[in-house]
Image (tube, coloured by chain):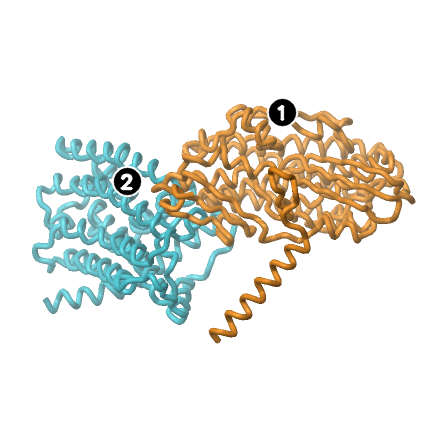
Amino acid sequence: MVSFLLWLLLSLVFFSLLGMLSGWVDRKITARIQWRVGPPWWQNFADLTKLTAKEVVVPVTAGPFFFLAPVMGVAAVAVTGAVVLSALSGTGGETDVIVIIYLLVIPSLALILAGSSSGNPLASVGIARELKLVLGYELPFILALLVPVVKTGTTRLSTIFHLLQGPAVLSFSTIVALLVALFALLGKLGWVPFDVSEAETEIASGLLIEYSGWLLALFKLMKWMLLATGITFLVFYFLGGLAGPLTAVVKYIVLLVVMVLIKNTNPRLRIDQAMKFFWGWLTAFSLTAILLAFLGW
Amino acid sequence: MDNKKKKVVVPIGPYHPLLEEPEYFALFCDGEVVVDVEWQAGYNHRGIEKLCETKSWDQITFLVERVCGICSTSHPFAYVNAVEDLAKVEIPERARYIRSIVGELERIHSHLLWVGLAGHFLGYNTVFMWAWKYREPVLDIFELITGNRQSYAMMKIGGVRRDVLDEDIPVVERVLDELKPKLEMLTQAVLDDPVLSARLKGVGVLTAQDIKDYGAVGPTARASGVAIDVRRDSPCAAYGLVNWQVITCQEGDVFAKAVVRLLECFESVKIIQQCLEKLKKNRGPIAVEVREIPPGEGIGHYEAPRGEVFHYVRSDGTNRPVRHKIRAPSFVNIPTFRASCLGQTISDVAIILAGVDPCYCCTERMLTVYDAQSGRKMMTGTDLVRLSQEKTEKIKQKMGKNG
């Protein structure tokens, strides 16, 4: 228990820092694609500091979850990170991949909770969209996570991390599953083309419309941590990141850049189109990947 | 109204990231589906028509330029047409070419601005930044030939105020040559993007009948297959002297509107290039002197980037008009949301509302209410002043009671 608390603390610090730096990579690449200069590397740290110093405006309609939801979100991502880190070190004991599936839903639920307790009509549209989106991307995400399970015959995280290495990584089924999971992660992060629940030009930030000050800062931090944790998880779960620290970093950056490129070369999908994409194409792809994994591809 | 009360109201405005001007659309939603829309304007009213009656004929050219920041030459264009119609003035040929050049440059920059904004509204910020990047050289040309990036002050009753210098012509030609491949790239990128097609095709369809019913004009009408264009139908300036085509599409959806606007940019480049060629050969005055404006009335119109802009002036022989009436294209284009928005989702409504390229500051006007049966004016200026004073009085009393 004590050791897990240490992992949790480490995860909180590590993934916050990594997340903010990854967020900067996102902003910098986005800026260069759009012929802008882009911010310096410490911009996200400055933004976070500034937000914590700003006034928190609480709407009269807000319930207690207005304050709890952002804390919940950050905590869930930190726990996810701790689980991944401890499994990597081999001291994670019996932690299962199913725990990860559960934990990674909590940030979205925290957002929904936050939106619903703010009592804003635009937030209510955001809630409806986020709920549908969660239903949408969870199905292909879970199916994609099954591929390494099929390949290794276990759901134990540390075993999968250690078994899936070397040539086994480059199998066709894991690559397909990774791509599916990458799109699901885009959905979890609320990045274009799946930023329907925040869609600033439609519903003016939707879920987060009433948030300000350190509460908003917590949600920003949650998104950055989710970005870092999500990609780290994918690198070790699908790409055999334990092969070496340098290749793991390269893989991390490649996945991040791919996500940023997808984000910058697409308009926002309508929620029904996003659902069709997740339940149609991606589900079909992940089912195929599972089938291929059974066949040993 | 009872039906409306049950629905969630999703407000777009009075200040909203979707639109850069203040106006208010109340979307009555049933889930994601918009069942009714209410539009309120009036946040931006500046009383320009009334102000025109206090300015001299030459001053008004600069005043109407401030009606709209984007089509800032279309209003003076239509206005000088109206005054020249009233005073029966023929402008020199060189002035015609210069007017058309300025008008078409404005069309290119306005259309590129819209493409960028449409991208932004769809969350496609890369298109936003790229389109605005490509728009930048056009503004540089404006600075070169008129001295200003916006509000060029080129129009003048009887001609234009500044000549296009011979040494500037090659620069303009070079910039246009460089612009063309960029425009082609942008057009291809928009036309070929499968996700953009999914978002825009079949969305917010206006049929040719809708266009006629609402009297919509400009690219909004041309995207529905209604080939109306003031430049062709009632040629002013140099539009009768150069070769170009009216671009139309049949589908009437937002995608068609984007296509029409992008293709019109190429036509504008064509017009400008021809006008520049003519300018090289045609030496002559750029304006005729207009000393007196006789009593009478005049109308002038011009195809602004958003559609036909119409100006009417009446003179009593003095140095200022007794009436100046402006009708901007958005005034007829915006109400088409009734035909195109109802039954669509919120996401689509956002882009449909932006699809007509609305300009709210052009559209603002004062309304007077008439009784339908008796035809009696229900609200006069004095009534409004009285109402406002009564309300102030009420607020004062309330504040006195509470604090």
Quadrant of the image for the N terminus of chain A? bottom left
* Colour given to chain A in the rendered image: cyan
Chain in orange, by letter, is B
- Location of mark 2 (residue): A179
Query: Which one is nearer the viewer's eye here, B183 or B340?
Result: B340
Counting from the top left corner in percent of width and height, residue A120 is at: 36, 55
Quadrant of the image for the C terminus of chain A? top left
- Location of mark 1 (residue): B227
Query: Which one is nearer the viewer's eye here, A33 or B60?
Result: B60
Kind of residue indicated by mark 1:
Ala
Whether A246 is drawn above or below A8: the answer is: above
Q: Residue at x 81, y 44 (%)?
A: B156
Whether B231 is drawn above or below A167: the answer is: above
Counting from the top left corner in percent of width and height, residue A21 is at: 36, 59
Chain letter of the residue beneath label 2 in the structure image? A
Q: Is residue A276 visible?
A: yes
Q: Tag 2's secondary structure?
A: helix
Chain letter of the residue beneath label 1 in the structure image? B
Q: Residue at x 25, y 55 (%)?
A: A245
Counting from the top left corner in percent of width and height, residue B119 is at: 49, 42
Q: 10 Å neighbourhood of mark 2: few (<14), some, or many (≥20)?
A: some
Q: Is residue A174 left or right of residue A21?
A: left
Between disc 1 and disc 2, the foreground one is: 1
Q: Is residue A148 left or right of residue A71?
A: left
Question: Picture quarter containing residue A19?
Answer: bottom left
Query: Which one is nearer the viewer's eye here, A51 or B58?
Result: B58
Q: Same chain for marks 1 and 2?
A: no
Q: Residue at x 83, y 51 (%)?
A: B56
Q: Residue at x 14, y 49 (%)?
A: A97
Q: Tag 1's secondary structure?
A: loop
